[in-house]
Image (cartoon, rainbow, N blue to C red):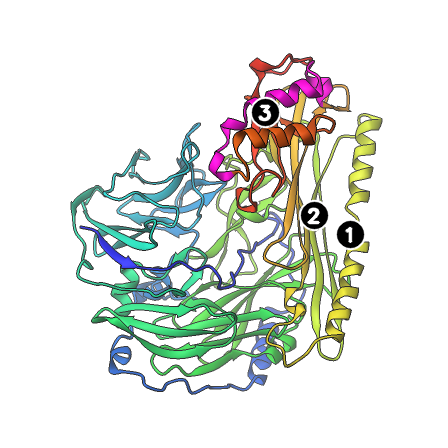
Amino acid sequence: MTKQLKFARSCSVALIASSLILSSCSSPDLKNKSQDDESQNLASAAAEGESAEVDNSASLSSTTEDATASDEDDNSLNSNGCINLGSKSRNILDNTLIKEDDNYFYYVIYSKLWRTSKDNPDDTVCLFPQDDSKYTINYNYKFALYNGNVYVLAQSTEDYNEYVFRIDSGGNASMLSFENEVKYSADIDIYNDTFYLYSFDSDNDMILEGYKLGDDGSLGEAYNEFENLDFEFEDGWVPVYTRFGSYKCSPSSIGFYGGIYCMDNAGNKSKLCFISADDTSSKTEIAEIDDGNVVALTKDKLVMLNNDYLGKYIYSIDLKTGERTDILTKESFVSLGYAHSTDVEVIDYDDENIFLKIDQPLAEDPVPDLVYDFVKVSLTDGQSELLCSITPGDDSPIDNANLIYNFTSKGLTYITFVYSNYYLCYRPYGEMNIENVLVAQDPDYGSDLIELEEYDITLSTSHSAYFYTDDNFDIMAFRSDLVIPQLPATSDEFIEFNDNIMENLDVADMAQSSVEDAKMNAEAYDSSSEYSPMDLYPYYYTYNYTGLEYHDSRYVCLSTSDYEYWGGAHGMGWEYSYTLDMQEGKILKLSDVISQSQAEFVELVCNHVTDLNEGSLFLTYEETADQIRSSYTDNDFNWFLTPDGIAVRFSSYEIAPYSEGYPVITVPYSEVSLLIGLEV
């Protein structure tokens, strides 16, 4: 039986962006100082900030007081001296990106689900999707485990709909069928031996389906423990979430807390309320919240992190009384040496502690590199302990999107990228200055970076950060992260490419302009204003190698992308493609590849406009084709080779909204006359 839960989705709460851990698996570069001494310094610095409490407990009913989570934690997992892995609040809220059972670790890299044996790490296999599947996994946390089975949400690359798959203990995948369509906002949960799917229909109502699980993990009879509940969310209200799209209204969450904690979104201010499962017709207000973003929801606290122009600080809200208590103050962060850190992230937590990953810029300005500190902070008194530090080292290529980490039974466990390979690593409890490699050989996670080595193409990495400091502000005004392909020096044309791309990516002028802009805004800042242009900083510029679009024994087509953010709702980016003749040392033009003229190729592209979804375009098919003719008959496309044909890429807002990314039209090879011998 399905259950309609009225729900208005809102995405205006600022996101806590996913960050990365970088290290060398063979020789970690740790800070040259005593970890015990550093822990004492951290604790002393945290103690400098006095606790501030705000009385927001008016009109609290006994419903809220009785609703505090009462399920006992699994204390058998609390023997590591660092984190209680058995904390119920930690385990029900999609916290972990690397999940585990008694025998395996499970994680998502490159949109694929992987499994690594704890006893034999070389036994690392891709569970889903396998081979040339038409499905891809978009969310690296939306999967669940049960008796050796894995349930995962995946999207079809054909119809772009979401589906749920079960992978049994033998590695066999099967699609699960449901009464309701699985939407992009869907999530899955396992509660009391019952599999639940919850998603949203076109009216933004939440749809909840439940099925009893057999011992073998198969779905049995329909069962919904929550069928008599009727939660209704007014416009602007959303369940609390610590990760975008992961709302805390799962059956496990409702069962644990006895209801749903929710917040409204009104600018930088919001209210925290509780809707009890015993009375879903009303909300009990707990506290007014003026700043920060939710980073943890324990059994008795909501933990908030503020990280903007007003400074960095962490505080908690008592779920019973609404009292606000400072955990780390702005002064604490300064004393700890993190005044210039742009990325402060909670990577894990239990009911007593949160665990932070903080980027620690080195002393120079601009910063040549970053160190990542992992800090344990007590939710009781703010006492802090440095667990370990990780640095990417010199010239280590970075892939931001595929680095994940959290605590497991092994210790601090993470995927790291070093020299074109991914490794599953961990730092054991009690010895976190020591890095251990679980997956010693790259199981071909799906990266095509290994192929670069065959062509002697390398990647050069550059990081920089520039600061603006005065009597009132101490902020990072600009930051860049660059991963730049360098071609083998086999021809003058390749050497010129390398020199030009490095010169074009010199960000010094861009950074200096940002610092001057920061100074101008700081001098004009009105402290009485609720908003300030300073909250837009830091400005970012990133440039990354994104992959091989095509490669054979002679020809290579590689792509890069950049992204710049200068304030506003979002930044802007672009993708670039280069088609290389590795034998002759040439960068090819389209006229080197096909015999058709530019005008003839434009018509071929226009013939395939109908391959796009007309509803996603600004104009009709015919009008879009006319626009392409007008723009490109005398101008070059951003084109690239694929295994299926020659593709052209359009920029954001060119023919479709920003949300559609970079629309691509592919002209099959059967429709062109090739001048080169591609192996297709």
- Camera-nearest residue between 173 and 215: 173
Q: CA distance from mark 2 to mark 3?
A: 35 Å
Please give the label number shown on residue 507: 1
Per the image, the residue denoted by label 2 is: 482
Residue 531 is drawn in which quadrant?
bottom right
**Residue most toward the left?**
221
SS at circle 1: loop
Residue 668, by quadrant, is top right
Amino acid type of the residue tagged 2 in the rendering: Leu
- 130 and 674: which one is in front? 674
Magenta segment = 590-616
Q: Secondary structure at mark 2?
A: strand
When the figure is inspected, residue 274 is found, relative to residue 142, above or below; the finding is: below
Closer to viewer: mark 1 or mark 2: 1
Image side of residue 181 versus residue 518, left or right: left
Q: Is residue 596 magenta?
A: yes
Q: Earlier in the sequence, mark 1 or mark 2?
A: 2
Pointers 1 and 2 in contact (CB under 8 A)? yes
Residue topped by disc 3: 606
Q: Is residue 123 above or below residue 665?
A: below
Answer whether residue 324 is magenta in the image.
Answer: no
Residue under the image location 34 percent in, 54 percent down = 204
Place of residue 599 in the rendered image (x, y in percent of width and height, measured from the top left): 69, 20
Which residue corresponds to the image point at 79% horizontal and 42% vertical from the top-left?
A: 502
Q: Given contact means CB atoms under 8 Å apart, are the residues at marks 2 and 3 in contact? A: no
What's the amino acid at mark 3? Answer: Cys
